Image: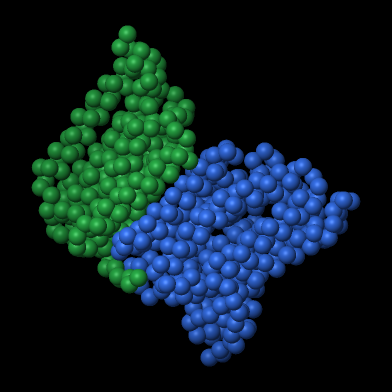
Chain colours: A green, B blue
């Protein structure tokens, strides 16, 4: 197999992609709420870094601005808010998974394999930021984000699953289409805000009614 | 310029590993204590411990056979042999270095654990037997992960000789940062935490049998044999750090001509790079909580998934 030597920007994007995937796997395995929120902040930080790097290297000032917004909103504000939200719930309690950890890890590995295979098939040029690997990483993060939301029956984990999914999409958007219009980026951020508000209401209702954020209780509420 | 003959450099490699390994353990123990707000033991404490054990009387359980007495020498011998197979100080292969590839070296390395487990069972005590069974369970799970890590790294070079891997990584700094390599390195780091008995797996300074894995195997040993086991443990850690640094992460700073000055510089640079890696290990050690025993398999399985993903990334041709 011939090996293509990487340029500095490709190596940088590749490293960030790998780190994002690592954080996503750690997040997938983690069962403690506080840890999940920290991991989400770390992942958002990496997304902000790549956005800043792409913005500075291509002289796209909207991406630079978006990076700063991402940092302020997703690395600082949102985790603080989520911590406040979960303070009422005993956050040391582990969130059970619907299936056992080994099986869920195997499913995750399979999904990553599928998304890598799909993205390697697409006739993308490697580009300045290693497009194939970015697309593969983006798809894996989206899949694992879904998996987190599906397998952990807890409102807070479902928010975090959704938020990491958005991180993945944002990472893909920044690296694959550096000309992303500013308004789209801001809209995505706004989307996150709306989602968080909706979930916050859900969590508060659940906690008030049942003193737990486990969504299994929702079926009883229908009563 | 004094150029050392290759055999002398090879001897220097083994001596570096044997003589500096307790110092690395001492530095880590001191750093962990300092972060916890304590003053901590001197960085030379592991040497004093080893000397102390050498002066003590050696006791052997009545039912133990020669396996029990032979094990500590096998452990130290295996680790000293491993030191000749990997690039510790030089960029070019030294005499005997091509006797085994990275998997062959791993067999030599595993022989140390095998001998320890045999001695633990031979001692006939429940505690040492539990230690042996736990360590073997963990070892079995770590093995496939490491194999996947080295497969993924070997994809770049088309060979899995440690010296060749080192040369490829030195050739291009950006290649160290390709996604698959970052993932493989992360997986190796996780396995390194497992193999050196660091905190998500077991707390290295604890004295309760409850969470013990590696140290539980040594309860019946005493005197010089215990000293050799302690020394072997330090060598194991030093060697894993060497592989992590010189084969996977930071291959720069090795001697390329075998001159006395460059070999001496390589020893110093290697130790500084180790302190850097030890810094990360100390951060992990002080920020994470120890996992419960049955959660260890999940930690290792996560490492396996990371290593498998790294291989995927190479196979589909990302970068």
What residue is drawn where x is 63% and y is 83%? B8
Q: Position of residue B275 (x, y in %)?
A: 52, 61
What residue is drawn where x is 81% and y is 47%? B124
What residue is drawn where x is 67% and y is 57%? B113
Q: Residue furthest top?
A: A223
Q: Eyeballing the image, is A74 above or below B197?
A: above
In terms of depth relative to the viewer, which is nearer, B103 or A129?
B103
Judged left or right of residue B221, residue B251 is left
Q: Position of residue B4 (x, y in %)?
A: 59, 87
Q: Position of residue A81 (x, y in %)?
A: 30, 30
- Which quadrant, please, contains the C terminus of chain B? bottom left
Q: Position of residue A80 (x, y in %)?
A: 32, 33
Q: Residue furthest right?
A: B62
Judged left or right of residue B285, residue A196 is left
Q: Quadrant of residue B5?
A: bottom right
What residue is drawn where x is 54% and y is 44%? B297
Q: How many marks?
A: 0
Q: Is residue B219 visible?
A: yes
Q: Quadrant of residue B94?
A: bottom right
Q: Eyeballing the image, is B70 above or below A204?
A: below
Q: Is residue A20 visible?
A: no
Judged left or right of residue B168, residue B88 is right
């Amino acid at each position: 197999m011939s090996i293509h030597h990487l340029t500095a920007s490709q190596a940088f994007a590749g490293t960030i992609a790998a780190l994002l995937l690592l954080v996503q796997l750690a997040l997938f395995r983690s069962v403690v709420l506080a840890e999940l929120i920290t991991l989400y902040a770390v992942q958002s930080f990496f997304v902000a870094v790549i956005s800043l790097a792409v913005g500075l290297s291509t002289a796209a000032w909207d991406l630079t601005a978006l990076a700063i917004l991402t940092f302020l909103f997703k690395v600082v504000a949102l985790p603080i808010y989520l911590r406040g939200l979960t303070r009422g719930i005993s956050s040391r309690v582990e969130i059970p998974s619907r299936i056992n950890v080994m099986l869920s890890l195997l499913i995750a590995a399979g999904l990553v394999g599928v998304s890598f295979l799909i993205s390697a098939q697409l006739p993308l040029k490697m580009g300045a930021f290693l497009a194939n690997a970015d697309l593969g990483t983006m798809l894996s993060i989206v899949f694992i984000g879904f998996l987190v939301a599906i397998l952990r029956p807890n409102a807070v984990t479902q928010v975090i699953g959704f938020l990491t999914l958005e991180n993945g999409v944002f990472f893909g958007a920044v690296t694959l289409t550096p000309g992303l219009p500013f308004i789209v980026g801001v809209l995505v951020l706004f989307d996150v805000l709306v989602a968080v508000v909706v979930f916050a209401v859900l969590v508060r209702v659940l906690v008030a009614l049942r003193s737990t954020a486990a969504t299994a209780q929702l079926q009883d509420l229908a009563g | 310029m004094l150029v050392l003959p290759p055999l002398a450099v090879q001897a220097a490699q083994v001596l570096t590993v044997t003589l500096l390994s307790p110092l690395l353990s001492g530095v880590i123990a001191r750093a962990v204590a300092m972060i916890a707000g304590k003053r901590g033991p001197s960085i030379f404490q592991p040497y004093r411990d080893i000397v102390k054990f050498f002066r003590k009387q050696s006791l052997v359980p009545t039912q133990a056979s020669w396996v029990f007495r032979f094990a500590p020498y096998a452990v130290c011998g295996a680790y000293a042999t491993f030191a000749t197979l990997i690039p510790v100080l030089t960029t070019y292969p030294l005499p005997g270095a091509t006797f085994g590839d990275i998997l062959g070296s791993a067999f030599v390395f595993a022989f140390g654990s095998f001998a320890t487990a045999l001695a633990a069972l031979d001692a006939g005590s429940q505690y040492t037997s539990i230690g042996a069974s736990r360590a073997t369970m963990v070892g079995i799970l770590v093995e496939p992960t490491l194999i996947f890590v080295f497969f993924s790294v070997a994809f770049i070079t088309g060979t899995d000789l440690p010296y060749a891997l080192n040369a490829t990584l030195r050739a291009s700094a950006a290649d160290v940062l390709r996604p698959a390599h970052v993932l493989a390195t992360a997986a190796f780091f996780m396995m390194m935490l497992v193999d050196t008995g660091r905190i998500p797996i077991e707390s290295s300074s604890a004295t309760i049998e409850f969470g013990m894995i590696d140290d539980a195997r040594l309860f019946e040993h005493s005197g010089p044999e215990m000293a050799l086991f302690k020394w072997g443990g330090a060598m194991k850690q030093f060697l894993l750090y060497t592989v992590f640094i010189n084969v996977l992460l930071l291959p720069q700073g090795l001697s390329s001509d075998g001159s006395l000055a460059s070999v001496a510089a390589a020893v110093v640079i290697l130790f500084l790079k180790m302190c850097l890696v030890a810094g990360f290990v100390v951060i992990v050690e002080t920020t994470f909580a120890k996992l419960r025993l049955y959660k260890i398999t999940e930690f290792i399985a996560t490492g396996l998934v990371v290593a498998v993903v790294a291989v995927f990334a190479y196979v589909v041709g990302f970068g």
